[in-house]
Amino acid sequence: MGFITPIGNDEETVWSNMVEGSSGIGAITRFDTTGFDTKIAAEVKGFNPEDYMDRKTARHIGRYCQFALAASKQALAQAGLDPAEMDEHIERMVKHLAVEIDATPEQQQKLAAIAKDAARDLAPLRGQAMETRRQAIELLSAPNIDRGAIEVLRAGKIQQADAASQRIARALADAAEVLTPEQRKTLAQRAARWHGRHRWS
């Protein structure tokens, strides 16, 4: 998971402050509060966008976009997925697939783009799944079993799975539209044979 929050900008700091009950609320520093009744807010502190992106990118996107990009990069790192390595892996897979179904260079390029986009969207979900497992272990090993918290965690897990399945389905449909009916038939046949060799006995 990725964290850019009022109580910390990394997993360790956020967790520590949550355990200690630290509040992220403080005096507003982002603008002059003269004339405003409210003088306090939960601001993100100590955030340097250039730790996560180049200066040009940081200058041309909003602060909330900076937070989202930074948190996404943290989630990728936690999931053990380097974007460059992931792209290279996808390129190799698509190249092998292109040989199997006799895809054209144009089709190969489109398939690679579809797979890369899907992988980037799914990477944060993988980080969330890892965090859910950690929370489940913590809840189930606690001195007292909190059924309410377990149910909340279960519902969240279902939402994560649904989001992932929707993204995968969209990518599969996009990829299918790139291929010809004959190529889809060949791919389905090879997938069926693979499944037959690897099914549980």
Image (spheres, helix red, strand yellow):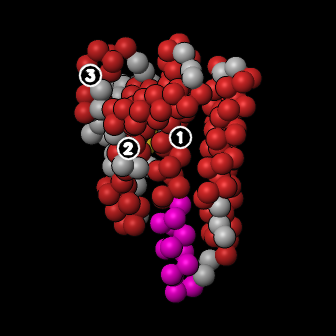
| 41 w.r.t. 30: above or below | below
Q: CA distance from mark 3 to mark 1?
A: 24 Å
The kind of secondary structure element at disc 2 is loop
What span is colored magenta in the figure? 132-144
Magenta stretch holds residue 24: no
Can you give x and y, in whole percent of width and height, for residue 23 in the image? 40, 55
Circle 1 residue: 122
| 87 w.r.t. 127: above or below | above
Q: Amino acid at mark 3?
A: Asp
Can you give x and y, in whole percent of width and height, for residue 174 in the image? 66, 25
Choose mark 3 or mark 1, whichever is in front: 1
The residue that appears at 29% across and 36% down in the rendered structure is 47
Can you give x and y, in whole percent of width and height, for residue 200 in the image? 65, 66
State the residue lying farthest toward the bottom.
Answer: 143
The residue that appears at 66% across and 70% down in the rendered structure is 201
Q: Earlier in the sequence, mark 1 or mark 2?
A: 2
The kind of secondary structure element at disc 3 is loop
Q: Earlier in the sequence, mark 3 or mark 1?
A: 3
Q: Taking 23 as reference, is 155 left or right?
A: right
Circle 2 residue: 81
Circle 3 residue: 54
| 28 w.r.t. 105: above or below | below
Disc 2 crowd rating (10 Å Cα; few below 14, some 14-19, many 20+) is some
Q: CA distance from mark 1 to mark 2?
A: 11 Å
